[in-house]
Image: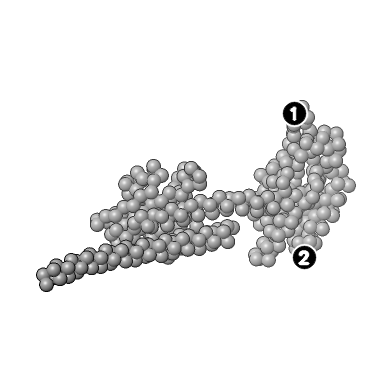
Amino acid sequence: MDDYKVKYQQLKSEYESYQKITEEKIQELSSANVQYEKNLDMLSNVILISNYINSNLSSKNIIPMINDMIIGIIGVTQSTIYLLEDFKFVIKATNGTEESIGLTEECKKYISKHKTFILNSKEPIIEDELNGISIHSRMGVPIKVGENFIGYIIVDHTHYNFLSEFHEIFLTSIASQIAIALENSILYKKIEKAAQCDALIGIYNRKTFYEIIEERLTNGKIEKYAIVMIDLDNFKRINDTLGHQFGDKVLIETANLIRNMLYPKDIIARYGGEEIILYIDCTDSNEEVYERIDNIREAVSENFISKEELGRNITASFGVGFYPYDGENLEAVINCADKYLYKAKHAGKNKVMSSHFLGKKIVM
């Protein structure tokens, strides 16, 4: 009988030991399953943000949008994205206040070394008493393109010990996505600019000129403007006698000279060949606009262009059309400017022709 009792106790002990091991294993598996689910959620959110970034490369609000997604996904009190510009930290997105996102000396030490950091403190790390915000948990993750440090994501929570290594993994992935987004955005802008600009001269091409002006005229109440058609005099002869490389330099230098004499709202584009077109914002009188264009003509004629041992002063002829005086729409004003350009060519070149002249100028 005693033997049965001993065996019973032995079996009971083994069963309880097995039950304990099994329960521990189930708990371990359950914890691992929870962690896998968290990792899966995190991966899904990273993919979500990545897809959003790739779909919105041209958006000016892409960084603020990413910042909002960080706040929503990991549930922090505030998030701030900094980027380096001219060796200074610039806030590109935040939902915090100037006081609550302030960087402590401890934060600055990590940032200066471009390191990830997690700070948890029962005492406030940073505090905005006016708005009742006390930060007790803070994390900073560097944003890098390759080995180049370009910024930081810093997230905060009012609860102590809220941020952990799990959040670090997520934010590191997001930092990589932001870096990719910035690289792609720069590339996108380069491609966009290449499509908008003349490859040789670097000013807008004809198609883009029309698009910009049409949008401006459609969206704004424009009462007056001028169109200027410019043609470089004897340009074919320059190409034939001095070569196309010298001709290219003439186009580039002349376009840059004209562009530097324009006002902020004026627009310059290559119309075709050696022809340049200008949109002039008319806040001044027609006569004052005419004087501006004549000053440009004079500057062009006085500009000595040289390449190696070759050198030449060049001139240009200008035709100016005014809206609404010379046409009721853009095409009509361009045709008018083209007509006066033709007259300037046949009147001896190096002239500005328009329906509006002063003093010594010939009235057409």
Q: Residue at x 77, y 65 (%)?
A: 328
Judge whether residue 160 can be spotted in this image: yes
Q: Which residue is the extreme one toward the right?
A: 346
Residue 274 against residue 63 in the figure, above or below: above
- Provide the secondary structure element on which disc 2 rests: loop
Cβ atoms at labels 2 and 1 below 8 Å apart: no
Q: At which x and y percent is residue 68?
A: 45, 63
What count of labels does the image hold?
2
Q: Which residue is mark 1?
A: 308
Q: Residue at x 47, y 47 (%)?
A: 144
Say which quadrant the N terminus sits in. bottom left
Query: Left or right: where does residue 180 sit relative to residue 123?
Result: right
Quarter of the view holding residue 6: bottom left
Q: Residues within 10 Å of mark 1 (few under 14, many from 20)?
A: few
The disc labelled 1 sits on which kind of residue? Glu
Query: Left or right: where does residue 235 sit relative to residue 279?
Result: right
Residue 41 against residue 99 in the figure, above or below: below
Q: Which residue is mark 2?
A: 328
Judge whether residue 291 can be spotted in this image: no
The disc labelled 2 sits on which kind of residue? Glu
Q: At which x and y percent is residue 25?
A: 31, 63
Q: Which residue is the extreme one toward the top?
A: 309
Q: Residue 277's mark?
A: none
